Amino acid sequence: MKEEWSACLAALGQTRDRADYARLFEHFAPRVKAYLVRLGMTPANADELAQEALLSVWRKAHMFDPAKANASTWIFRLARNLCIDRMRREKLQFYDIDIDYDAPDPDERHGGEQAILATRMAESIRALPEAQAQVLYLSYYEGRSHSEIAQAIGIPLGSVKSRLRLGFDKLKQLWGESS
């Protein structure tokens, strides 16, 4: 599948075929948006940046070299760079997620089950207050200890623990599990 997307992007760079672009956009836009949310963007800003990244794909497709990277690596790198630029400009906190761009798509590995769960969890976390979502992210996506989180965001250790507990309680409610 990686080779297919790389071939599609390379063809887009040569032919500027709108059908190739539409295929790339349909496949990558939601994935890029989800990635940007995981980097710390709000869903609205992530949506805007994802569209900007995919517009860059259209404009820069002629620069893609399949010998240097596959399509997903190239596209996610464009999105990541746009995100970093925006966050620096707006002086926002940037959460760098180690992502294996070449890993098989969750849709391909598990028949979509993993993708569905990941989407549901991302939507649930977005429904949390920002303070709770932030500590959950730092704890479980970055693997930071409670004291590291307290130091990183400048709050007392007890507040970190309270936010985590409240966040978990709300996630349980959203997922329909009893406390």
Image: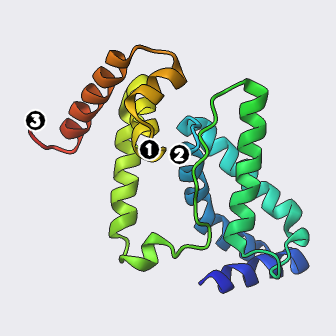
**What residue sits right under mark 3 in the picture?**
179
Q: Amino acid at mark 1?
A: Gly
What percent of the width, then of the height, locates residue 166?
A: 26, 26
Q: What is the x, y in percent for residue 156? A: 40, 14
> In which quadrant of the rendered image does the N terminus lie?
bottom right
Assess disc 3: are there few (<14), some (14-19) or many (≥20) residues with their C-alpha within 10 Å of its C-alpha.
few
Q: Secondary structure at mark 1?
A: loop
Label 2 crowding class (10 Å Cα cut-off): few <14, some 14-19, many 20+?
A: some
Instruction: Select label 3 or label 1 by which is in front.
Output: 1
**Mark 3 belongs to which amino acid?**
Ser
* Separation (CA) of disc 3 from disc 1: 24 Å
Residue identified by numbered label 1: 143
Image quarter in which the C terminus is found: top left
- Choose between 45 and 157: the one closer to the eye: 157
Q: Is residue 95 above or below residue 165?
A: below
Vertical placement of residue 103 versus 35, above or below = below
Q: How is the image coloured?
A: rainbow
Asked which quadrant contains residue 162, the reply is top left
Characterize the local packing of mark 1: few (<14), some (14-19) or many (20 or more) Cα atoms within 10 angstroms. few
Q: What residue sits 53% from the left and 25% below the top? A: 152
The CA distance from mark 2 to mark 1 is 14 Å
In the displayed structure image, the side of residue 102 where residue 120 appears, left or right: left
Q: Secondary structure at mark 2?
A: helix
Number of numbered discs present? 3
Using residue 6 as the reference point, say whether residue 26 is left or right of it.
left
On screen, residue 169 versus residue 97, left or right, reads: left
Residue ranking furthest to the left: 178
